[in-house]
Each structure stands twice: as structure tokens, then as C-alpha cells.
Image (tube, rainbow, N blue to C red):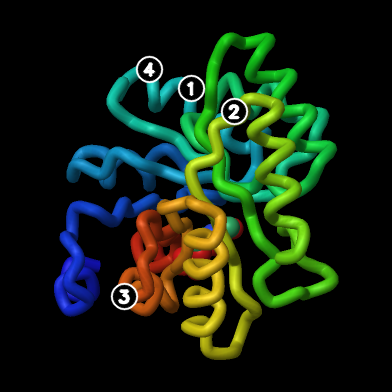
Amino acid sequence: MAHAATIAGRKPEDVELIAISKTHEAAQILPLIEEGQRVFGENRVQEAQGKWPALIEAHPGVKLHLVGQLQSNKAEDAVALFDCIHSLDRPSLVSALGKAMAKAGKQVPCFVQVNIGAEEQKGGCPIADVPALLASAREAQIPVIGLMCVPPADIEAAPFFALLAKIAADNGLDQLSMGMSGDFETAVMLGATHVRVGSALFGARD
Ligand SMILES: *Cc1c(COP(=O)(O)O)cnc(C)c1O
């Protein structure tokens, strides 16, 4: 990450590493916390509720990000547990999260997830709908800090990262959640401020 940032003329400390710990037990997560890693990501609310409250209580500096699809009926649970949500992608979720944040009195920074490859089966807001979703999030007083994407599998990710960066700039957003184990260097060179890395840290998932 530091090398990719340096060649791109960026400061290594301007890119946050989110260690994606989904499917891994506390025993596998603890060594990373002991090495100084402080930001972790999970893709399921229920799984995170099972293992993180105890870990966070023991290590109060640890921050937890939600990187997976969020059902509206889990919005309150997500607001209670997570420090950042990367998967705001539709009007019904704007409304659920807006209500949950108001009720909890807690503003959780969010990324709007964009369906950058226009893939039918994938989550994320269609590119054309991004400005309207951002406007409704503002109206619901949700702090949107940037855009997130998961590009199509098995093809070069760079054009999709570049496109996400352009859409963010066009909408006045400066944070980009993009890049995973296989392509984080490319993402950092194209402006990622948050990379989401799982298997390169923890080994392959079952
Ligand atoms: C699992 C996951 C990652 C991490 O993927 P790796 O290839 O293991 O680095 C990143 N982002 C999201 C949304 C994920 O679900």
C-alpha cells in the first residue's frame, strides 16, 4: 500500500487499511489487533454482533466498518455497532438509516455503494441514480463521506476504480472505498482512501 501510494505521489498515511475479518474467529483477529491494526470490516451484521462487542470492549481503540449489503430491518443494529457503513445503496435504506441514526443520536459516516459495472445481480446504486441518492441522504441528515464499489470479477478493475473516482469528484466527495486483496495497489494508485483487504491478511476463507 505504501509503495503504491508513493509512486502515485500520495502519502501512505492517507490510505486506510480495513482488515476484512468476515468468517474469522476472535482468535485469528487478535494477533492483528496486537500488531496494531485498528480498523476492521465485516459484511454481516449478525456475525459481527457475535464476535465484536467483546473484542471492542477489550480494545477500545478498534473501529468496525460494515462492508456488506444491509437490510433495512437491520439498520438500528448496524448503527449501534458500526463506526462506518460502506453499503448505502438505495432509497429505502436511506430512510431506515436516517431514522436509526436520529433515534440513536449517533451519526455514522457512510459511503454510497455504486454498482460500477452495472451488474444485475450486484448491490449498489446505479450510476445514474447517485446524485438523487446523495440528495436524499443529505435530507435524511446521513453523513455521506464518499463512494464505494466492488468492480466486476475477473476483469481489469482499473477502469472501474477510475470511473468511481470521477463520479465522486463530480459529486464533491473525496473519499473512495475501493480495492481488495487482488487489486488494492491499483486502487491506491487511482485514489482509494480506504482499501478493504481480507484474504491477503488472514489467508483464504473456507
Ligand atoms: C470480503 C470482502 C472484501 C475482502 O475481500 P478479499 O478478496 O478477501 O480481500 C472486500 N470488500 C467486500 C465488500 C467484501 O465482502
Is residue 145 depicted above or below 19 in this figure? above
Q: Which mark is residue 123?
A: none
Residue 89 at what x, y percent from top left? 72, 49
Name the residue that disc number 1 marks: 53
Is residue 8 depicted above or below 130 in this figure? below
Q: CA distance from mark 3 to mark 2?
A: 34 Å
* Circle 1: element type: helix
Disc 3 beta carbon < 8 A from ligand 1? Answer: no
Residue 100 at what x, y percent from top left? 70, 19
Name the residue that disc number 2 marks: 49
Type of residue at label 1? Pro
Q: Nearer the viewer, mark 3 or mark 2?
A: 3
Residue visible at 50% across and 36% down?
84
Residue 195 at what x, y percent from top left? 40, 59
Q: CA distance from mark 1 to mark 2?
A: 7 Å
Residue visible at 18% across and 45% down?
35
Neighbor class of circle 4 (other Cα within 10 Å; few <14, some 14-19, many 20+) is: few
Disc 1 to disc 2: CB gap under 8 Å: yes
Disc 1 to disc 4: CB gap under 8 Å: yes
Type of residue at label 2? Gln
* Circle 3: element type: helix
Q: Earlier in the sequence, mark 1 or mark 3?
A: 1
Q: Is residue 169 left or right of residue 186?
A: right
Residue visible at 72% across and 58% down?
124
